[in-house]
Amino acid sequence: MIKENYKNRIIDKKIENYLSAFGAICIEGPKWCGKTWTSSYHCKSEIYLGDPSGNFQNRNLAAMSPSLVLEGETPRLIDEWQEVPPLWDAVRHKVDENPAKGQFILTGSSTPNHKGILHSGAGRIARIKMNTMSLYESGDSTGDISFSDLVNGKFTPKMTGDVDLRKIIEYIVRGGWPASIGLPIESAMMLPKEYIEAILNDDIYRVDGVKRNINKMRLLLCSLARNESTTVTNKTLKNDIKAMDDEDIDTDTIAEYLNIFQRLFIIDNLKPFSAKIRSSVRVKQAEKRHFCDPSLACALLNITPAMLLNDLETLGFLFESLCEHDLKIYAESIGANVYHYQDYHGKEIDAVIELNDGRWCAVEIKLGANQIDSAANNLKAIYKDMEADPKAILPSMMCIICGLSNAAYQREDGIYVIPLTALKD
């Protein structure tokens, strides 16, 4: 690649840190999110197992003699290593023989079966998860407010400018795919549609060589799209498919398909933040359903920008997905994790960020500025409930991520209001 043309990613710093600490790293994530381009930027030699030239000679060479493809200047990129799973053990063995750091960068857009992999690679090969682009990475956020500074009490109020609702909708429908950035929205919308077709018609079979009912898998993906940003159960997904498509599918099959989607990094659910609060309040353990990129839900349901303008409820769910997608990227850059909170008394927190020192932050997500007061009231009610419980650990920071706010500020009650299009890592 021409490194001068490389568009920096937030994950770059983490990759550099991991290369200085481990013999090899494995960068995983959805296909087309930029793993190969970013890995190529950080490597000094490379081999592409998906290269079809010479009747896939690179892949054939790797299968016959894995050690040969490891030869080259380091860090050496081995792209789509899962095409030849024994390469994992070959890299692990090479790192055992030579304790030097930063020898190999593996990339993968699916997680293979453990069959054929003898060793976990723990301590030798570190895994890094990569996402599609955040709005800051794509150039659609001004970056006026640093997420890292915010959670650590460093904040300066700022007028961030008006936000066009149509632009927010375009960011959702377009997604964070590097190849779509800068394209007209009509062209950008084609990529997530093709992504779905590539997954269904090729990647699902290649992940383990098992033929499955592609029509039922498509129906499940559509059901997930209809239930984006919710905590519906597998049973509810089954009933949704039956009601919308009159197709019967059992919950065991749904669980199997969801596992495949997870291994292909298509879905990226938010886990519940329960025990971490250490409160006596009983909380639900359901994950919040998310695709790896909100544009996939739009593609599956054939949603256009005009349709979202006339369906604010669906837009609200998809905006929540967009925010939580970006929050994950910003949080992971400082070693934090993102969860959601939902108890049996009807109290919810859209996103919970747990910092690596044990502190946690409560985040509500609202599209319109007219919803800020209700979001703040919800946060304060949950805080009051926890405050009355001596077992609870209170949030160190509370904020509202808003779509259409024109300023970043702190309310009199101490709650921050931050426009999504002003946020960065």
Image (cartoon, rainbow, N blue to C red):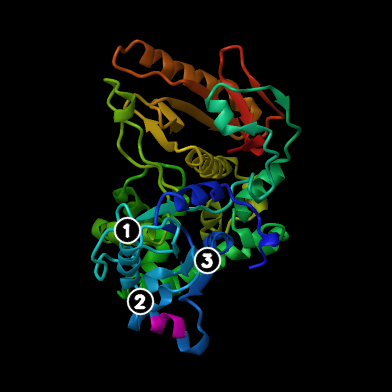
Label of residue 237 in the image = none
Crowd rating for badge 2 (residues with CA inside 10 Å; few <14, some 14–19, many 20+): many
SS of the residue under disc 2: loop
Label 3, secondary structure: give it. Answer: helix
Q: Position of residue 186 (x, y in %)?
A: 69, 62
Q: Secondary structure at mark 1?
A: helix
Q: Magenta stretch: dominant SS?
A: helix
Residue at (37%, 31%) from the top-left corner? 342
**Hey, what amino acid is under mark 1?**
Asn
Name the residue beneath numbered marker 2.
Answer: 66
> Does residue 63 sit above or below 123 in this rendering?
below
| Drawn side of residue 367 relative to residue 241, left or right | right
Q: Is residue 259 left or right of residue 363?
A: left
**Could you tell which of marks 3 and 2 lies nearer the N-terminus?**
2
Question: Residue 259's mark?
Answer: 1
CA gap, disc 3 to disc 2?
30 Å
